[in-house]
Image: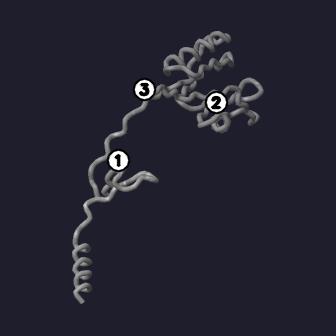
Amino acid sequence: MLKIIFLFCMALLSASIPAEAQTACPYGATPGAVTCGPMPDAGSTAPLPPPVPSGEWESRYSALAVDVNATVIGASDNRVSRIDAEDAAIAGCHSKGGSNCSVLAWSANQCMALAWPVGGRGGMTGTGVGKNSAKAGKHALSRCAAPDGSCKVIWAACNKPIFHPYK
């Protein structure tokens, strides 16, 4: 009988003592090992530290310039600035015989396409952007208008930003 009372008291005592802490151990480590740490508290309201950037992105640009009277275009891609892309497109238009070249469209960090009415004069060009050349071309065709209804994608390019990791 004394033995039963003793066991009963021990059970009561052990049930009323709260556990101090659990440990988070990697697979294969025994609790209490140096590689173990405290378990994260599920109810903790401590803020997480802010993320640390590992590098930075550099944008890339493309542009289209057109001289509608001379039906010539100039295009540029993979340029470091919008102005650089537009200047290169205008220069390309002038080099093909355009005298009244102006920027038609520009894009950054994506694909761009130009659709042109088939069969010479008349109609309206169409530009489009997308995540790949096919989607950009589809958008350009949907914006192009030709007297006979036929347009063709005559230029497409994709510009992806470049990631520069910190050293």
Closer to us: 83 or 126: 83
Q: Nearer the viewer, mark 1 or mark 3?
A: 1
Q: Nearer the viewer, mark 3 or mark 2?
A: 3
Residue located 24% across and 77% down the image: 10
Q: Quadrant of residue 45?
A: bottom left
Q: Which residue is mark 3?
A: 166
Sooner in the amino-acid sequence: mark 3 or mark 2? 2
Give the structural element (helix, strand or loop) at label 3.
loop
Q: CA distance from mark 3 to mark 2?
A: 34 Å
The answer to whether 166 appears left or right of 145 in the picture is: left
* Label disc, if present, on residue 113 of the rendered structure: 2
Give the structural element (helix, strand or loop) at label 1.
loop
Q: Position of residue 11 (x, y in %)?
A: 26, 78
Q: Are marks 1 and 3 in contact (CB under 8 Å)?
A: no
Q: Quadrant of residue 143?
A: top right
Identified by mark 1, the residue type is Val
Q: Position of residue 90 (x, y in %)?
A: 58, 15
Sooner in the amino-acid sequence: mark 1 or mark 2? 1
Q: Is residue 137 above or below residue 1?
A: above
Q: CA distance from mark 1 to mark 2?
A: 60 Å
Q: Position of residue 30 (x, y in %)?
A: 40, 55
Name the quarter where the C terminus is drawn. top left
Q: Quadrant of residue 43?
A: bottom left
Name the quarter where the N terminus is drawn. bottom left
Q: Are marks 1 and 2 in contact (CB under 8 Å)?
A: no
Residue located 57% across and 22% down the image: 78
Identified by mark 3, the residue type is Tyr
Q: Which residue is mark 1?
A: 34
The answer to whether 131 appears left or right of 56 in the picture is: right
